[in-house]
Image (cartoon, rainbow, N blue to C red):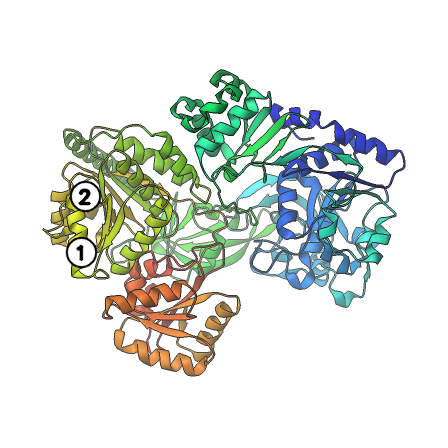
Amino acid sequence: MKSISKSIESILNKLKIASFVYEELISGKNNLSVKYLAGSLKQLFTAKLSILSNLPLFIITQNYESAEEWYHDLKLIVDESTISILSKPPKHIKIVGNADDDHNGWLIDGLGKNLNLHNGIAIATPDIFEFLLPKPSSLNAHKLTIKLGDNYNFEKFTTELMLNGFDRKEYVFSQGDISIRGGIVDIYPIGWDNPLRIEFWGDEVDSIREFEPLSQRSIREHKEIDFIANFFDSSANILEADIFDYIKKSSICILDTPEQLELNDNIQDKLLAYKTLSINPLSKTDFTIKSRLQPNFNASIKDFIFELRKLSFLNYKIVLSADGKIHTQRLREIVENINEIQDTETTETSTELATNAVLHQSVRYTEYGFSNGFICDDIFSAIITEHQIFEHRRIRDTKKSIKAASININELKELKIGDYVVHSEKGIGKFDGFQTVTMGGSQQDCVRIIFAGNDLLYVSLNYINKITKYSANENSAPILSKLGSTDWARKKERTKKKLKDIARDLITLYAQRKAQTGFAFPADSLWQKEFEASFPYEDTPDQARTTFEIKKDMESKSPMDRLVCGDVGFGKTEVAIRAAFKAVQSGKQVAVLVPTTILAQQHYMSFKDRLGKSPVNINAISRFRTPQQQTEMLSHLRQGGLDILIGTHRLLSKDVEFKNLGLLIIDEEHRFGVSAKEKLRQLRSNIDTLTLTATPIPRTLNFSLLGARDLSLIETPPRNRLPVYTEIVEWNNETIVNAINREVERGGQVFFVSDKIDDLDKVAMQLQMLLPTLRFVVAHGQMKPKMLESIMEKFTAGKFDVLLSTKIIESGIDIPNANTMLINRANNFVLAELYQLRGSVGRSNTQAYCYLLVSPDKKLNQKAF
């Protein structure tokens, strides 16, 4: 058993039923059942059985999602390296690094991981019985062990790996890839979370390192490794076994809700040869334990606290389970501030509720985020999960989180000969390709960089973290650095001095701003905490930190002036909604200023969706509203009956008057003109201001136009967010048709953007002829408001496959089902516009694509790429 919290260990110790079941199994009974294991109590019970028996467990559950829950909960208690999932992931789940599906790599991965485990846990779904597998002896025969200092014939070693199914690539990124550079072999074996770098000195293994595929940074060194060295392609004629050949006779087979598994008679007969345990069968059972699922609190802190009081009064030990420190701390704060909750509706049962002191003694916290909470009456214990209290939509970690270094392999591959790069110690040079050089008797691949005077520097790929791609706003070429000169060191010192000067200016500007007095919002109420906890997704660390910084500013007497900078789709809107809710609770009004009509409507829907359960009045003013509607709305605003008003430049008109404005939220301020910015200065002289942007303008320009402000960065993408695949291509009917078809066939939608309104109908007709079965619609800013609004609503609802539009969709349109974008004549857009447009796709955990189309007769210079 791995090291776990005392509160979870205490629950495990109370599960005596696991001991009774184990004793019956070892006494010779082969077909037992246990009933009423609710929620994650199934996994706790199974983990206890694994610890007691020290035998292999083979768990069969309904589907891949259920298998993931089993895996997630079991790894909180037992060693993760002993657990594997033997189930094919659904098509919509992409696992970065997983072996190619053509080889059933997902299966070989799991088998390889559990091959030599005596007490391993394999979690499978019923489809596992349909697959033919290599014999265990074949799998063992192809297991390769490599030790530091051992000798191998280098050429034979690499050749055999490629003959056995490993695919030679320039760089390794997926399981089954191999790269050979001089005496270095990079290999991504099945069953491994990261690739391996094996360095040879002649035929001797000189070092073995595990590394991150993108950054190339070493994670750890190994003295010995073993992996499966063959993909077992079906053509190899060795698929002669089934999963029962891998289930040891000593194994305990666990059937999760057996009636839902639909196992045929043949499978059930084979299972009779093993110790079998059915969990939660519908039929009669041998053992029962009285437990139930965690109640549905409907995101109500009041209902949650009421349940805690009841359980504490009955002397239950309660474990509050949350994912990580941030969510655990939020739960702790709610319970510690329990005095804020007045139980006016439960006075009749107040004698059956625990006091605050008793409740605090009963509650423990764990950062282990179990999948499903439960209350077990037989052992007077409960695990209540934070994500279920507040109805979060949890996303499993189906891919590794890879943080890129200064430059990563993908960026390095995109460099062209002559591109400028910066070496952190040597200065600015030109990228001159790759070259294999001999270092210390072994060959290594290096990046070659040309400096001033045609001096050359060779940088081993092991040290590419020292290289960054040169970027600047100026069009002029930089001056190359001279190797051996002190110029680069002096430049870095001058830059540091300039940064200090900027900091000094900032301090002066901050002091001037601090001299002003604004409204100090009160500390968070219980309703603020409940509202934030009701966010249906998990906060990223940067979201949580930015929320804290904003609220701290709002609670200060000095007017807030904070810039929140984060990539498109990283959660800036949610942070703004939380700030707006805090302002409204204090009786203040909120203005939300956005650059486009469509974005105003998008924000209106987002605010309505999140604040729908709260007594907050929200509206949007734009050309989507009739003059009469606008007049009524503004009258309501002046009287204080409207809490949040969202709008475009219309918000800056003289007839827009707030009764008690307390917070101004500005989305993409750089999109507003000089006159609009002047009005903004007047509007926000002493009120709290929050600015959101994905493409901030340079700091010097920011100082001159906007004044100094505090900065919050949201750099962490949501979990499972994949980078948008972006490619510059010439206009080609086949490419366009393939891109659109691929998206529609997987159930998605497509944006097609053009720089001219006149071209939209022509392109729509052309595409309709190429793809006659698809549904196309055109949208642009010159349409009547009602028509444009109707088109966008229908596209959002999935009634069209392809939306052809101008750049009106540029700023933050949120349609998670649209994950392919084609931009016609992309060379006519500025970089910031392309960046914003691309942000309209890839807003879910689905791989997104963006194609920048250029005319075949248009020649782009090197910098355009």
Residue 144 located left or right of residue 607: right
The C terminus lies in quadrant: bottom left
Q: Where is residue 380 in the image (x, y as percent from the top left)?
A: 64, 25
Query: Relative to the observer, which residue lies in front, 224 or 389?
Result: 389
Give the residue pinned by disc 1: 630
- Residue 372 numbered tag: none
Q: Position of residue 624 (x, y in %)?
A: 24, 61
Residue 312 located left or right of residue 502: right
The N terminus lies in quadrant: top right
Q: Name the secondary structure under disc 2.
A: helix
Determine whether 762 is above or below 457 in the image.
below
Give the farthest residue toward the right.
Answer: 28
Q: Position of residue 295 (x, y in %)?
A: 55, 36
Give the residue pinned by disc 2: 703
- Quarter-of-image position of residue 17: top right
Between the residue at mark 1 and the residue at mark 2, the CA separation in whole angstroms equals 35 Å
Determine whether 813 is above or below 21 in the image.
below
